[in-house]
Image (tube, rainbow, N blue to C red):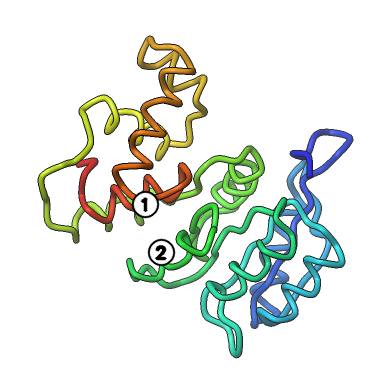
Amino acid sequence: MAEGTATDPIRVLLADDHPVVREGLSAMLESAEGITVVGQAGSGEEAVVQAVALRPDITLLDLRMGGMDGVEATGQLLREVPGCKVVIVTTYEDDSDILRAVEAGAAGYLLKGSSRQELIDAVQTAARGETVLTPSLAGKLFRTRAAEPSPLSGREREVLRLVGRGLTNAEIGAELFVSEATVKTHLLRSYRKLGVSDRTAAVMKAMERNLLA
């Protein structure tokens, strides 16, 4: 699935068990250029069925729904539609839920109280294959985890901090005055040390362990 452009908008599926929430999210997203809401689902099970049928670029999933919750739906949806990116949208800030969602393959996490622009930015960020993490959630992770000796080098921590800010590998290279290949090398070493396999999980695991403070 290609990232949306002026002629190829980002296709979004909304999944929340409250119709008023779905309508609110839909109204905010439909007001943005380059984004179109292709469907809505009221449960995790329905979200998976809709995703298979509609093949969205992005699915916004409520974390807490009756039956199959957002985390379980994330894992099943990504198995069925591997090209789709999932962003968890919820009122809850519990750290274990953030990590569960990321471990299931979510591209990130956004609060329902986020502004229209934050919501649009999150969809566009996820469509680029980058990490979605609200500043308040990042701060909460930093505050609530005890510090521990870091297995990461100083440069590996720098790279992950910039990933957490949503920068691409090329942008990180420019920021640190190194090549994109060097950035990829630092990321791969970080993955190995943290026991993860992608950028989003590396940032979340490092934050969980307070390695980026």
The answer to whether 19 appears left or right of 133 in the picture is right
Asked if marks 2 and 1 touch (Cβ < 8 Å), the reply is yes
Mark 2 → mark 1, Cα distance in angstroms: 8 Å
What residue sits right under mark 2 in the picture?
98
Identify which residue, 88 or 45, lies in the foreground. 45
Q: Position of residue 213 (x, y in %)?
A: 19, 41
Q: Quadrant of the N terminus?
A: top right
- Residue type indicated by callout 2: Ile
For the point 74% across and 39% down, the residue is: 3
For the point 79% across and 75% down, the residue is: 49
Identify which residue, 119 or 202, lies in the foreground. 202
Residue 204 got which mark? 1
- Residue type indicated by callout 1: Met
Identify which residue, 95 or 135, lies in the foreground. 95
For the point 53% across and 72% down, the residue is: 71
Element assignment for label 1:
helix
* Pointer 2 or 1: first along the chain: 2
Q: Position of residue 58 (x, y in %)?
A: 69, 54
The answer to whether 98 appears left or right of 144 in the picture is right
Q: Is residue 60 above or below residue 62?
A: above
Q: Quadrant of residue 187?
A: top left
The answer to whether 206 appears left or right of 9 in the picture is left
Q: Quadrant of residue 92?
A: bottom left
Element assignment for label 2:
helix
Q: Position of residue 61 (x, y in %)?
A: 61, 68
Estimate how packed mark 2 is, as few (under 14), some (14 to 19) or many (20 or more) residues with alpha carbons within 10 Å. many
Q: Position of residue 152 (x, y in %)?
A: 23, 36
